Image (cartoon, helix red, strand yellow):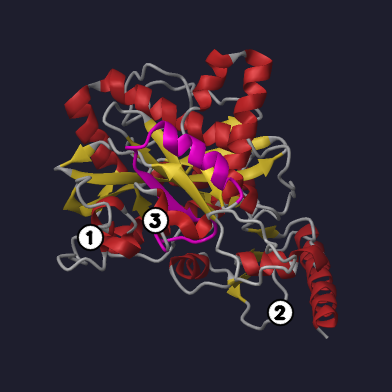
Amino acid sequence: MWASCVLQECKRTKNRSMYNRNRTNRGENRVIRFKCTLQNTITDVLRSRGWQEVKEESGDWDFYWADVGWMREVFDHCYMEEHMRLNHFRNHYELTRKNLMAKNLKRLRKQIERDSGKIEAAKCDFFPTTFELPADYHIFVEEFKRSPNSTWIMKPIAKSQGKGIFLFRKLKDIMEWKKEDSWKIDGTKDDREPVENYVVQRYIDNPYLIGGRKFDIRCYVLVTSYMPLKVWLYRSGFGRMSNTRYSLDSIEDTFVHLTNVAIQKTAPDYDPEKGCKWSLIQLRMYLLAKHGPEAVETLFRGMDDIFIKSLQSTQKIMINDKHCFELYGYDILIDESLKPWLLEINASPSLTASNQQDYDLKFKLLHDVLTVIDMEGKLSGKEKQVGGFDLMWNDGPVHCEDLSMEGAPNPPYTTNTMLGCFNNREENLKKMMRSHGSSNKT
């Protein structure tokens, strides 16, 4: 029954796609039909573009903002016409599940060390020492005993929003994950419920503090192709602040150590209007005032390296499909020496706004994602900036030709990234619209 429904949907999609393509060939404006599994900011953006919403489960579509469950169950059975677009790659989890991300980054580091030596491999030292439990329990114990006074953090491999995370300093706190032989002494199989898979990481206990409080940074990276690798970096983002002053005296206090909004908004003194976020431009200006341009540029170039190297770690195993793209939410922590650390990568970054400022940021972000994807066919393909997105990698590093761009006067680097700089997206979009209008007249 299920397979029959999928087959019928695919046939209808194919017929509708051929009809739309014929209309396009005749010079008619094609109506873009979209489906969306979410009811938040992305739905508002899709409707604002004048696209036609398909609410029927078996309805035909051109663009689908799908959840990962749909990718897992339906994608492999669905016919995709040339122009159709989808917001996930088939095996996106290779980068976004915490255990697989660590495994792929470790493999990349070993490969770089073999090919280019230890000095070059050291550039991959941007994620904490990580083990998967219970599989790596005994290896982890050896590492734990080498530094018995360290603090460690446990994270479930496939959960988000801070769920299930806790800190510990004693092995007795994680005995539940001790790897045991699944067979008893009498030869019968142990029928105990298996524990949930976790990663355990060395806790970065010297974070950079603002006002005595811990924070991390959410950045948005858009990948439109893995082969060749094509990466766009969004200029805007935000710092997620803790409501409680940082201290290692109480590692049980999640309000101190976890900056997730889902955690912080449950704090007794949380103010929903004020929120717990700083804009990325505000954060960059603060760091510039405290440490000067050279140190801050080094920090942000380090973040660029994290984005590219993490994507390269899965480039050869990611199932590249011309219909797919991915908007990743990167979580970066800065330590007291201004070193950036990769905490995790999200395939479904939260699109629900916590306040009006957050809604405005996410609305513009998603609007620019759709402009880059270019369902309307308005772009030339040679753009280095689209709205708030800068093309940072196109089968190699992309360099900025205009070094006097507004918000970044005379930068000491040539990479085409402006993370945390002035976001001139409205000016850029208007310029592209004028250019497109001129092309149509011609």
Do residues under tags 1 and 3 come within 8 Å of each other at their CB atoms? no
Residue matched to label 3: 173
Quarter of the figure with the N terminus: bottom right
- Given residues 240 and 430, the one toward you in this image is 240
The question of residue 157 being in magenta is answered with yes
Which segment is the magenta one?
A: 135-163
> Between disc 1 and disc 2, whose residue precedes?
2
> Between disc 3 and disc 2, whose residue precedes?
2
The amino acid type found where label 1 is placed reads: Gly
Do residues under tags 3 and 2 come within 8 Å of each other at their CB atoms? no
Residue density around tag 1, few if under 14, some if 14–19, many if 20 or more, within 10 Å: some
Residue 40 pos. (x, y %): 44, 71
Residue matched to label 2: 59
Q: What element carries label 2?
A: loop
| Residue at 67% over, 53% down | 89
Q: In this view, does 387 lie to the left or right of 98?
A: left
Q: In this view, does 38 lie to the left or right of 70?
A: left
Q: In which quarter of the image is residue 50?
A: bottom right
Residue 268 pos. (x, y %): 17, 68
